[in-house]
C-alpha cells in the first residue's frame, strides 16, 4: 500500500509529541499500534480466505473432468458386462435345452390278444 520510512516516523513522532504532549503520546501510540495490528490481521485473514476460495474453484474443474471420465469408463464397463452376459446366455441356451428331462410316458394299456 504505502511505505513509511524512518524519517517520516521521526517527523510524525515530533508532531505527535508537540500536539499530544508527553503524557498522552505513549497511550495514543499503543492504541494506534493495536488498531494497525488488528487491521493488518483482518486484511490477511480476508486475503487468505479469498485465496482458498479461488483454489477450491480451480480444483473443481479438474475434479468435474475426472468425474466425467469415470462415468464414461463405468458406462463402457457396463456395456461390456451386458454383452458378456448375452454371450453366456446364448451359449447356455443349447445346453439347457439338451438337458431338459424327457417327460415320463404313461404306459398305455395294450389291448388283449385274441387268444387270451
Image (cartoon, helix red, strand yellow):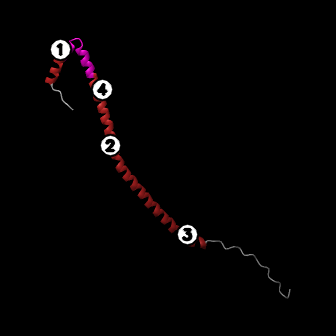
Q: Position of residue 26 (x, y in %)?
A: 23, 15
Determine which of the numbered discs, if any, sits on residue 38 in the image. 4
For image coordinates 79% across by 79% down, the residue present is 109
3 and 2 marks in contact (CB < 8 Å): no
- Quadrant containing the N terminus in the rendered view: top left
Determine which of the numbered discs, if any, sits on residue 18 in the image. 1
User: In which quarter of the view is residue 99 placed?
Assistant: bottom right
Q: Position of residue 52 (x, y in %)?
A: 33, 39
- Magenta stretch bounds: 16-33
The residue nearer to you, when weighing 21 against 45, is 21
The residue nearer to you, when weighing 66 against 10, is 10
**In this image, 33 relative to 11: left or right?**
right
Residue projecting furthest to the right: 116
Q: CA distance from mark 4 to mark 1?
A: 27 Å
Is 28 covered by the magenta stretch? Answer: yes
Q: CA distance from mark 2 to mark 4?
A: 26 Å
Q: CA distance from mark 4 to mark 3?
A: 78 Å
Q: Earlier in the sequence, mark 3 or mark 1?
A: 1
Q: CA distance from mark 3 to mark 1?
A: 104 Å
Query: According to the image, label 3 marks what residue?
Result: 92
3 and 1 marks in contact (CB < 8 Å): no
Q: Earlier in the sequence, mark 3 or mark 2?
A: 2
Query: According to the image, label 2 marks what residue?
Result: 55
Amino acid at each position: 500500500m504505502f511505505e513509511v520510512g524512518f524519517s517520516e516516523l521521526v517527523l510524525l513522532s515530533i508532531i505527535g509529541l508537540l500536539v499530544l504532549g508527553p503524557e498522552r503520546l505513549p497511550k495514543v501510540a499503543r492504541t494506534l499500534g493495536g488498531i494497525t495490528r488488528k487491521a493488518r490481521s483482518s486484511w490477511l485473514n480476508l486475503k487468505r480466505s479469498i485465496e482458498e476460495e479461488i483454489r477450491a474453484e480451480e480444483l473443481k474443474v479438474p475434479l468435474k473432468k475426472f468425474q466425467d471420465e469415470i462415468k464414461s469408463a463405468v458406462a463402457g464397463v457396463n456395456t461390456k458386462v451386458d454383452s458378456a452376459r448375452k454371450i453366456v446366455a446364448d451359449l447356455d441356451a443349447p445346453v439347457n435345452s439338451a438337458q431338459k428331462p424327457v417327460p415320463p410316458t404313461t404306459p398305455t394299456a395294450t389291448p388283449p390278444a385274441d387268444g387270451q
